């Protein structure tokens, strides 16, 4: 799949993540975010900007997995500023830099391309971010 190749070319490593990996850490919102980082998520010091292109919306989930609970939705045209990315067997996930409306303490994860689950492009990259440790900073 092209989007996974592009992710790997941009320094994103592919990892297998399941909710079983995250469940023990889901006691708090901050712990859930840190659990994703321990599973291989890369933090962005300068946010990447993605536009929702899928109609009518995309889901923002509690964890980077299509089986994770839905926190909120992003209607078509919504701008998502991502502060972390994680590549899984389902594709590249981005974590919203801003909290979701229904839970101001939690940031949601959105899938960029739904090819692995029978969908196409969900989010289009408008502006790449800068990863922690990136020499371009």
Image (cartoon, helix red, strand yellow):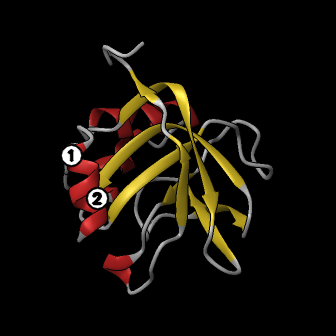
**Viewer-proximal residue, 10 or 45?**
10
Gap between marks 2 and 1, in whole Å? 24 Å
Please name the residue shown 69% across and 37% down the image: 98
Callout 2 secondary element = loop
Position of residue 69 measured from the top left corner of the image (x, y, whole percent):
55, 64
Callout 1 secondary element = helix
Q: Residue furthest right?
A: 101
Other residues around mark 2 within 10 Å, as few (<14) / some (14–19) / many (≥20): some
Q: Is residue 108 left or right of residue 116?
A: right
The dot on residue 99 is none
Q: Are marks 2 and 1 in contact (CB under 8 Å)?
A: no
User: Which residue is tagged 2?
Assistant: 18
- Determine which quarter of the picture holds residue 107: top right
- Determine which quarter of the picture holds residue 51: bottom right
Q: Is 118 located above or below residue 50 in the figure?
A: below
Q: Say whether disc 2 or disc 1 marks the residue closer to the N-terminus.
A: 1
Position of residue 94 measured from the top left corner of the image (x, y, whole percent):
48, 48
Q: Is residue 110 left or right of residue 64?
A: right
Is residue 17 visible to the viewer in this orientation of the structure? Answer: no
Q: Is 134 located above or below residue 23 in the figure?
A: above
**Viewer-proximal residue, 38 or 42?**
42
Q: Is 48 located above or below residue 2 in the figure?
A: above
User: Which residue is tagged 1?
Assistant: 9
């Amino acid at each position: 799949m092209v989007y996974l190749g592009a992710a790997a070319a941009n320094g994103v490593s592919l990892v297998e993540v399941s909710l079983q990996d995250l469940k023990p850490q889901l006691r708090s919102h901050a712990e859930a975010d840190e659990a994703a980082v321990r599973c291989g998520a890369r933090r962005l010091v300068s946010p990447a900007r993605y536009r929702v292109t899928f109609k009518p919306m995309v889901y923002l989930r509690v964890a980077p997995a299509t089986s994770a609970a839905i926190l909120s939705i992003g209607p078509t045209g919504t701008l998502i500023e991502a502060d972390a990315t994680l590549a899984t067997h389902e594709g590249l996930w981005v974590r919203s830099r801003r909290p979701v409306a229904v839970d101001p303490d939690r940031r949601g994860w959105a899938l960029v391309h739904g090819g692995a689950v029978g969908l196409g492009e969900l989010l289009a990259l408008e502006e790449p971010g800068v990863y922690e440790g990136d020499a371009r900073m």
